[in-house]
Image: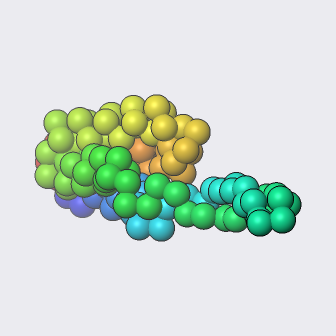
């Protein structure tokens, strides 16, 4: 018996992995744009304020937690129900905790992981 595509947990696991790991790895390698303000004093006593755009938090290892959780959830949607629930709830909890930085971008992927875990629970024979 074949499962329709919209009820296949592997599809939701793959889409969730793309939606979570994509922005997370981008921010891991590139960082987040921020501003840096520095004040310079010249020999004549004049002060100049310089504002520049810099990339902060590049190579911060914290976003890799999302990638690891997404990998566990995607593998769980492919293989096991407990791994799917553990990974999807982990990614959902951390996306809510980091809602004001990167969590808003990865929240849709966390919801897809939850849907995949639910279909994995319903369809035990896949």
Q: Nearest the camera: 9 or 84? A: 84
Name which residue lies at 23% across and 35% down: 86
Viewer-nearest residue: 18 or 47: 47
Whole-percent x and y of residue 102?
51, 48
Looking at the rendering, in which quadrant would you find the N terminus? bottom left
* Left or right: 68, with 116 as reference point: left
Q: How is the image coloured?
A: rainbow
In the rendered image, is residue 77 in sight?
no
* Residue at 55% over, 63% down: 55
- Residue 53 pos. (x, y %): 67, 64
For residue 66, side relative to residue 40 (left or right): left
Between 42 and 120, the residue placed more toward the observer is: 42
Residue 36, given in percent of the width and then of the height, sits at: 65, 56
User: Which residue is at 32% across, 52% downward?
Assistant: 61
Residue depicted at x 55% and y 44%: 101
Kindly indicate the quadrant of the structure image that contains residue 110: top left
The residue most toward the front is 44
- Relative to 31, is 77 above or below? above
Q: Between 89 and 59, which is closer to the camera in this rendering? A: 59
Rendered view: 38 above or below 83: below
């Amino acid at each position: 018996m074949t499962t329709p595509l919209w009820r296949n947990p592997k599809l939701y696991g793959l889409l969730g992995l793309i939606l979570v790991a994509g922005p997370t790895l981008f921010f891991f390698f590139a960082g987040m744009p921020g501003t840096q303000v520095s004040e310079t004093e010249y020999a004549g006593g004049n002060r100049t304020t310089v504002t520049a755009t810099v990339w902060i938090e590049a190579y911060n290892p914290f976003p890799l937690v999302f990638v690891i959780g997404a990998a566990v959830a995607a593998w769980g949607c492919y293989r096991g129900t407990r791994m799917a629930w553990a990974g999807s709830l982990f990614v959902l909890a951390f996306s809510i905790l980091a809602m004001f930085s990167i969590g808003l971008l990865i929240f849709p992927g966390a919801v897809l992981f939850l849907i995949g875990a639910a279909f994995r629970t319903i369809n035990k024979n896949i």
